[in-house]
Image: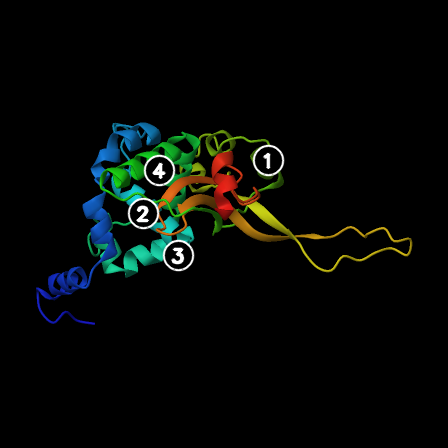
Amino acid sequence: MHPRSLFSLAEHLDRLSKDGDPLEVLAGTVEFEYFRPLLTRGLDYSDGAKGGRPPSDPVAMFKVLVVQTQHNLSDARMEFMIRDCLSWMRFFGFDLGGSMPDENTIRHYRNRLTESGTLEALMQAFEQQLREAGYLAMGGQIVDATLVPAPKQRNTEEEKAAVKAGKSAKQIWRGRPNKAHQKDVGARWTLKVGGKVRYRPDGTPLPQIATPVVFGYKSHISIDRRYGFIRKASVTSAADSDGRKLPPRDRHKQHC
């Protein structure tokens, strides 16, 4: 596919704007740079003095998480959509053909915000900006949880035991920072107990078999039923129940 002219990409993006790009509306409503100090503290990245590839821009990555949650996408699918969708690329501030986050970067970024307790504060600040802009979402709340698959790990029995014991990747793969960065110690299998219940001759039920379904995480969100605004968000392993990490008041609003 060849561009019609040097200006064809700009013309295409202008047409998207004229057709009503919803992400442009979001960018014009929310001042995302306002979140940079909070993101910087929560991520606690180094100053780069030791070298290595610089981390992705925290504000751009926060935008990635917002759009990913809105569309219920896995990390792998989100990586593809960032490269595929021009309007998304423009919203995130990524250059065509330039460096873009892969699924490991998205997962790592989300985990750091969750572990530092920053994610909930971000969502509260996000909602406050919407309120100040005149968007008061009061259409009742829906609690939802989306499974986010993660790459299956190939660990030894000793490494698996260390993961179950709650050790961090840096502790398990000490002295091997590149491998530790690629390893995921927070994901878990979600289990499904399925099939028809069968009974013994004496009437007692037979044990049911739990089948592993998805390895990864579960993204919990509380959203406004009518307007779709995200009010609360948290991320757990896939093994946790829906809405477990959201405050009780949000879980009880599911059927408002």
| Mark closer to the chain start, 3 or 2 | 2
**Amino acid type at mark 1:** Lys
C-alpha gap between disc 4 and disc 1: 30 Å
Residue 67 in picture, x, y percent from top left:
33, 50
| Mark closer to the chain start, 3 or 4 | 3
Local packing at callout 4 (Cα closer than 10 Å; few below 14, some 14-19, many 20+) is some
Q: Mark 2 points at which residue?
A: 64
C-alpha gap between disc 2 and disc 4: 14 Å
Residue displayed at 15% across by 64% down: 15
Q: Name the residue under label 4.
A: 123
Residue 38 in picture, x, y percent from top left:
29, 30
Q: What element carries label 1?
A: helix
Q: What element carries label 3?
A: helix
| Mark closer to the chain start, 4 or 1 | 4
Residue displayed at 37% across by 39% down: 109
The quarter of the picture where residue 86 lies is bottom left
In contact (CB < 8 Å): disc 3 and disc 2 = no
Q: Between 86 and 80, which is closer to the camera in this rendering?
A: 86
Q: What element carries label 4?
A: helix
